[in-house]
Image: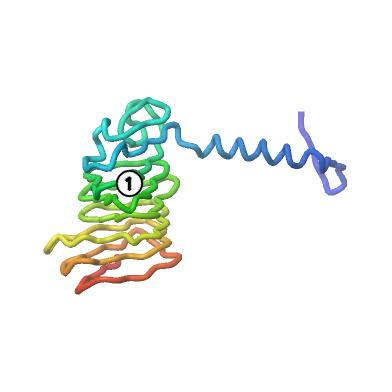
Amino acid sequence: MNSKFSARTPFRFSNALAPLFGVVLGLFALAASAAVVTSTWSAATSGNWNVNSNWTNVPAQGGFPNNGNGGVATYDATISPLGSPYTVTLNSDVTVEDLLLNSANATLSQTSGTLSATGAITLSAGTYSLAGGTIANSTVNATVPIAFAGLGSNLSGTLSGVTVSGDLNFPDTFSEGLITGGTTFTTAHLSGVHSEIGFA
């Protein structure tokens, strides 16, 4: 059976149903975009990203946040505990739906591997130290800057295919960053000491 609509086809939608229609669409959108598991860093203590016990998962399934890990299709990851300064070390390839860094006491130190977010990476508080790894194919909303940590003569970090809204910081004498793969900036400021940035 074929349906045809033309400019003269009458179609009426009651204004009284508009709020209900909006709620239904919103619920469908939420279901389509929400990760299966939300993982939160458990305490204000240092540790490695890829250790299951360092995370609290809701619902309680899967392991450390990495899409597909432990049979869980998608994860959101949140680093938010307050307390003494601590460092979360990321040194492997990880893909999540969304990442939120939201603790003034936290440093997320990416020393190797590639981090990708199918939704967004949001840096609201704390320090994101890009010290040898790559952020790829992601949107980054950075209230606090991405810090390219110096590694002597080695490349500090790479942005590849990233859309950045926020600032980049080169805090060390030998900080170097590579920007490649169609990375774009909606807003950005650069700051640093005797640092280099390469575009490819």
Give x and y (percent) for residue 107. 27, 51
Residue type, numbered disc 1: Leu
Q: Quadrant of residue 162?
A: bottom left
Give x and y (percent) for residue 58. 41, 30
Give x and y (percent) for residue 47. 21, 40
Residue at 31% across, 58% down: 159
Residue at 36% across, 55% down: 125
Residue marked by disc 1: 82
Q: Is residue 157 positioned above or below 29 on the image?
A: below
4, 37: nearer the viewer? 37
Q: Residue furthest bottom?
A: 194
Residue at 20% across, 65% down: 175
200, 198: nearer the viewer? 198
Q: Is residue 53 positioned above or below 87 on the image?
A: above
Give x and y (percent) for residue 140. 40, 55
**Quarter of the figure that contains the N terminus:** top right
